Image (tube, rainbow, N blue to C red):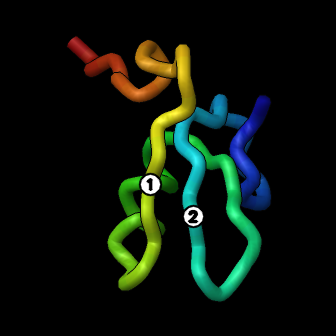
Amino acid sequence: MDCAENGCDRPACVELHIPWDENRVVCAPHARVLGRQDGVVADPLPDSADDLLEEGND
């Protein structure tokens, strides 16, 4: 499943519970940004641990 944000093709790994809108499943980078808004709860999806960790560039 891909991230729900427009133009993003990263794998979705977090469900955002948004009080003023429908819940969304998004990638880790979008979850970090959108999860900072008041009232938003980020809930990692089961079996998505590998997608939560981003590989660094060596």
Q: Is residue 31 above or below residue 50?
A: below
Tell me which amino acid carries mark 2.
Answer: His
Q: Quadrant of the N terminus?
A: top right
Residue 21 in the image: x percent, y percent? 71, 80
- Are the two marked residues, 2 and 1, in contact with CB atoms closer than 8 angstroms? yes
Residue 15 in the image: x percent, y percent? 59, 48
* Left or right placement of residue 50 versus residue 24 in this view: left
**Which label is found at residue 26?**
none
Name which residue lies at 65% across and 30% down: 11
Residue at label 1?
42
Name which residue lies at 52% across and 21% down: 48
Residue at label 2?
17
Name which residue lies at 43% across and 63% down: 41
Q: Secondary structure at mark 1?
A: strand
Circle 2 packing at 10 Å, graded few (<14), some (14-19), many (20+), is some
Q: Is residue 11 above or below residue 26?
A: above
Q: CA distance from mark 2 to mark 1?
A: 6 Å
Tell me which amino acid carries mark 1.
Answer: Ala
Q: Quadrant of the C terminus?
A: top left
Residue 36 in the image: x percent, y percent? 34, 72
Q: Is residue 47 above or below residue 39?
A: above
Q: Earlier in the sequence, mark 2 or mark 1?
A: 2
**Occupied quadrant, residue 57:** top left
Circle 1 packing at 10 Å, graded few (<14), some (14-19), many (20+), is many
Q: Secondary structure at mark 2?
A: strand
* Left or right placement of residue 8 versus residue 50 in this view: right
**In the rendered picture of this protein, how many numbered marks are placed on residues?**
2
